[in-house]
Image (cartoon, helix red, strand yellow):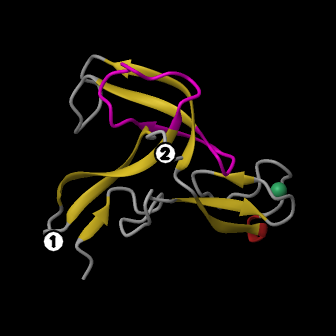
Amino acid sequence: MPERAAAQPSLYSAESADPPALNGGRCRACGYVFFPPQSYGCESCGAPPQHLEPVTLAGRGTLHSFATVHLHQAKGIEAPFTVGVILLDDGPAIRSILTSRTDEGLRAGDRMISTMVPQGRDDQGREVVELRFQKAASDQG
Ligand SMILES: [Zn+2]
């Protein structure tokens, strides 16, 4: 039995590598890569869903923009927290909560990597982990 559970299992695996990878999709017709996974059809060339296939996206990218939320607006998270848009090296952009609570020390263009943050336990006693992004150390990313 797994001891960890992903808070959003459709988007990433709790057992994933370091840094954790994300579940995305790719169009076999035109090569367009997207996140999150969807099964409506290709947003780029209009190919039907049977041309889409799941791909694993590396949890690495570049910080595009970010904002700190100072009021308590989200369920289950304490303000302040910082939300960033990261352009993944594999193509798509992802909006993610960052591990740093404020924007201190963050700049657009920073290298970012994904990480798993424990968020308590589920009713089966498994540790629930949520994927977030943090600034990469200079020897990472
Ligand atoms: Zn396509």
Between discs 1 and 2, the one toward the N terminus = 1
Residue 63: give x, y in percent of width and height.
55, 31
Using the image, determine if residue 44 lies above or below residue 85: below
As drawn, the label of residue 19 is none
97 within the magenta span: yes
Quadrant of picture, ligand 1: bottom right
Using the image, determine if residue 104 lies above or below residue 95: above
Q: Which segment is the magenta one?
A: 87-111
Residue 62: give x, y in percent of width and height.
58, 36
| Quarter containing the N terminus | bottom left
Q: Nearer the viewer, mark 1 or mark 2?
A: 2
Residue 69 sits in quarter:
top left
Residue 32: give x, y in percent of width and height.
78, 54
* Element type at mark 1: loop
Q: Is mark 1 within 8 Å of ligand 1?
A: no
Q: Residues within 10 Å of mark 2 (few under 14, many from 20)?
A: few
90 within the magenta span: yes
Q: Is residue 15 left or right of residue 121?
A: right
As drawn, the label of residue 124 is 1
